[in-house]
Amino acid sequence: MKPTVASALWWCAALVLVGGTSGIVMLGERHIDDQTVMNDGLTASLAANDVTVRTRGSLLAARGRLRADLRRLEADSESAPIVARFVRDTARVAQEHHTTVASIAAPGSPLAPKDRAQAIDAIPLAVTIEGHYTDVLAVIRALSSLPVPAEIDVVSIVRTTSPGAVGVAAVLHVALQRIEPRAATRDVGTRPD
């Protein structure tokens, strides 16, 4: 078999066709690989969004509870400055005694006065103090003598179990006392002349 111009031309055309096809296939594979990487990123993003959407209900419920707690705490415009002052003073006292205020929360609704003849009602707070035992006791003693009148009950004092932590955690129920506005208008026992 003798090579002829026609067979050489045919082989050249076949080589061009095979080379062009393989070039197009490689470009297509590269595009498919890029698209696969992009799809994997989108899948991961969708999975993260799905988790966020699933937790959204619990986050909205927690948001509602927090707003209700805030409204309950700020229901009376007179209670906000009292609570703010107590929180500020508590932070200062805790810092002075090298302790930590782990939490301050407003549990339940405000307490009603024990005796209606008294014009005092209370703003309840749950406070957790952490530190060395003697420092925590010093903080409790100092909180009892703050300018904001407060009734402080020690609920529990337990040893902390955190690795490397030496100390206790004290849970306190604090009832911040305030005088109701109607008390200011009452006769407070002045002597007649």
Image (cartoon, grey):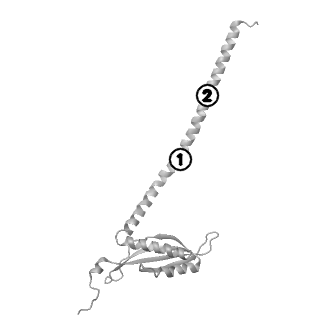
Can you say whether 150 is above or below 32 in the image? below
Furthest residue in direction bottom, as rendered: 193
Q: Residue at x 69, y 13 (%)?
A: 11
Q: Secondary structure at mark 2?
A: helix
Left or right placement of residue 175 versus residue 156 in this view: left
Q: Secondary structure at mark 1?
A: helix
Give the amino acid type for the residue marked by disc 2 in the picture: Leu
Give percent across and percent down for residue 95.
53, 73
Q: Earlier in the sequence, mark 1 or mark 2?
A: 2
Neighbor class of circle 1 (other Cα within 10 Å; few <14, some 14-19, many 20+) is few
Q: Which residue is disc 1 drawn over?
A: 47
Q: Quadrant of residue 123?
A: bottom left
Q: Residue at x 51, y 45 (%)?
A: 46
Give the amino acid type for the residue marked by disc 1 in the picture: Ala
Left or right placement of residue 178 versus residue 139 in this view: left
Q: Quadrant of residue 190?
A: bottom left
Give percent across and percent down for residue 64.
41, 61
Furthest residue in direction left, as rendered: 193
Closer mark to the observer between disc 1 and disc 2? 2
The residues tagged by marks 1 and 2 sit, at their Cα atoms, a distance apart of 30 Å
Can you say whether 158 is above or below 49 in the image? below
Badge number at residue 27:
2
Q: Residue at x 57, y 41 (%)?
A: 40
Can you say whether 182 is above or below 80 in the image? below
Left or right placement of residue 8 versus residue 110 in this view: right
| Quadrant of the rendering where the N terminus is positioned | top right
